[in-house]
Image (cartoon, rainbow, N blue to C red):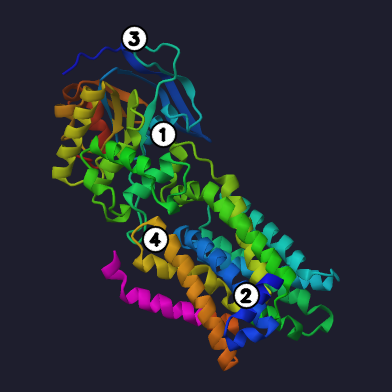
């Protein structure tokens, strides 16, 4: 477990600094004064009840949501350069009948050559390299609608890892993945952050993986109501209050 | 056109002795890839009801053009369809209604307006029958030229925008997270559908036009594994049905549009039987 630094003077070790983030839509305050520091190489999990503001927090970080407060990214050793962000949105419900393969999805995302002409040899090689990072080379010709939850997450992860980002942001990567697939996926995320020395910020509803994999957990409930190691947050009064009122998401 | 006529004359095919059949065949050869390509996105983007509504709006445009005494009511229809498509996109992006509800609103309004305008002052509706049934045998070289132009435009647009449109249709969150803004592409696409539908309405007929916009890709989807096959089969099915329909209508004396639609329906039926084996 890495030591979690949290404070205003993280220096070079801070990959993402969020200070007093507030989001208000109409009269509804979605988030208020949420502050979080994600350090380089750290895995941070955002947890909270449904509608607590987790996805809004990620959208604000990604610049897709108007907000108050400060959000600063910094790439380690690359002061002044724009850090690369890899993003895995929530899994879609692909239509099982859509004739779109994993290779087509990559071409649509990464190439100017129209996907209906098929992938060029160079593009196919690149797709295989990307899929190899998530041990998914065999998925290249599978239709996206035929992928299992775990396979789909690996494909989306492979897309987010090209180019290799400084910070990887995942929205509910474990939803729709079976228990065995969850361990495989979390092991893979752990391996990826160690291999590429990147930070990971993810939302999740599954707390069983937190102690083993997360360095820091932030409980979001219209703001950050608990922050610390998984043990600290899962045993906090704020955690009990958030989930007992909602009927227990555990 | 003279080169095309010479090619047809050189072919030992009886039905190509007549100029109207030569025109019709050329029109089919241009229309088939046009519908084949466009139908892929109509089906992937779940817009089949929308393209049907555009056909209705085109009819309204023709009625308005006729009543206003415009020399070529077809161009009035093109303008009205574009207006319809842009207005629909605008309302859809600013409304919390489901797309099919809004399409119902626009479609029924367009039809009602078309019939209202067409029958103003006790006018007979009969003169509009050609737009309901269509007659490809009366297509003019000028209309064929317009079809060729729109085909070139659609292919160019497809090469530039199809990746972004496909990604947005199947996974909008990923598209927006990658900075893909498809507002303009989607508007151009709906305008392209509007123009295609309007230009072909008098040849194919409003009542069956939408089958050409949906069936090629629907049949292709049954047997395609990837986007390349999806587009290829859609165009090939469209071509086969177009030529087959024209031949059948020539020898049986039926409406060509209806024969083409039925051919496509037959291809869909056959592809449906093979759907499990090809994927």
The magenta stretch is B261-279
Nearer to us of marks 4 and 3 is 4
Q: Earlier in the sequence, mark 1 or mark 3?
A: 3
- Which residue sits at x=59%, y=69%? B31
Q: Are marks 4 and 3 in contact (CB under 8 Å)?
A: no
Do pointers 3 and 2 mark residues of a single chain? no
Residue B275 on the magenta segment: yes
Nearer to us of marks 1 and 4 is 4
Distance from disc 1 to disc 4, alpha carbons, whole Å, reads 39 Å
Q: Which residue is mark 3?
A: A12
Res B212 label: none
Do pointers 1 and 4 mark residues of a single chain? no
x and y percentages locating residue A152 in the rendered image: 28, 46
Residue at the outermost bottom position: B252
x and y percentages locating residue A51 in the rendered image: 36, 39
Nearer to us of marks 1 and 3 is 3
Nearer to us of marks 1 and 2 is 2
Chain at tag 3: A
Do pointers 1 and 2 mark residues of a single chain? no
Res A56 label: 1
Front-lying residue, B123 or B17: B17
């Amino acid at each position: 477990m890495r030591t979690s630094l949290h404070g205003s003077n993280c220096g070079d070790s801070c990959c993402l600094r969020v200070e007093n983030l507030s989001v208000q839509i109409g009269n509804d305050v979605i988030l208020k004064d949420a502050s979080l520091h994600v350090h380089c190489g750290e895995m941070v999990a955002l947890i909270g009840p449904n509608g607590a503001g987790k996805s809004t927090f990620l959208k604000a970080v990604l610049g897709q949501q108007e907000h108050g407060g400060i959000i600063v990214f910094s790439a380690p050793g690359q002061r002044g350069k724009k850090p690369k962000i890899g993003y895995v949105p929530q899994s879609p419900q692909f239509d099982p009948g859509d004739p779109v393969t994993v290779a087509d999805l990559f071409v649509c995302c990464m190439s100017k050559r129209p996907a209906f002409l098929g992938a060029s040899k160079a593009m196919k090689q690149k797709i295989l390299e990307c899929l190899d990072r998530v041990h998914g080379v065999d998925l290249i010709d599978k239709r996206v609608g035929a992928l299992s939850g775990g396979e789909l997450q690996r494909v989306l992860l492979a897309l987010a890892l090209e180019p290799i980002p400084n910070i990887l942001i995942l929205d509910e990567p474990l939803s729709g993945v079976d228990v065995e697939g969850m361990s495989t996926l979390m092991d893979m995320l752990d391996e990826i952050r160690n291999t590429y020395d990147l930070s990971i910020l993810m939302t999740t509803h599954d707390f069983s993986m937190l102690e083993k994999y997360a360095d820091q957990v932030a409980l979001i409930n219209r703001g950050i109501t608990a922050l610390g190691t998984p043990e600290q947050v899962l045993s906090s009064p704020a955690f009990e209050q958030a989930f007992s009122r909602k009927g227990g998401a555990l | 056109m003279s080169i095309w006529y010479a090619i047809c004359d050189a072919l030992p095919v009886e039905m190509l002795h007549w100029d109207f059949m030569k025109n019709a065949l050329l029109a089919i050869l241009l229309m088939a890839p046009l519908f084949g390509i466009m139908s892929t996105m109509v089906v992937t983007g779940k817009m089949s009801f929308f393209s049907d509504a555009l056909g209705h709006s085109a009819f309204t445009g023709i009625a308005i053009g006729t009543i206003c005494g415009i020399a070529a009511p077809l161009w009035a229809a093109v303008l009205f369809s574009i207006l319809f498509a842009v207005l629909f996109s605008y309302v859809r992006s600013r409304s919390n209604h489901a797309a099919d509800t809004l399409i119902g609103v626009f479609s029924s309004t367009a039809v009602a307006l078309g019939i209202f305008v067409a029958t103003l002052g006790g006018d007979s509706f009969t003169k509009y029958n050609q737009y309901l049934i269509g007659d490809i045998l009366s297509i003019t070289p000028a209309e064929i030229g317009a079809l060729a132009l729109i085909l070139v435009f659609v292919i160019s647009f497809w090469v530039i925008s199809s990746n972004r449109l496909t990604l947005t249709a199947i996974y909008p969150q990923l598209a927006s997270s990658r900075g893909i803004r498809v507002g303009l592409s989607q508007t151009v696409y709906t305008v392209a559908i509007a123009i295609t539908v309007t230009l072909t309405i008098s040849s194919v007929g409003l009542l069956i036009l939408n089958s050409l916009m949906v069936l090629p890709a629907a049949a292709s989807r049954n047997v395609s594994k990837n986007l390349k096959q999806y587009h290829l089969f859609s165009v090939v099915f469209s071509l086969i049905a177009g030529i087959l329909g024209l031949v059948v209508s020539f020898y049986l004396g039926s409406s060509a549009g209806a024969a083409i639609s039925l051919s496509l329906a037959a291809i869909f039926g056959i592809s449906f039987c093979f759907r499990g084996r090809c994927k």
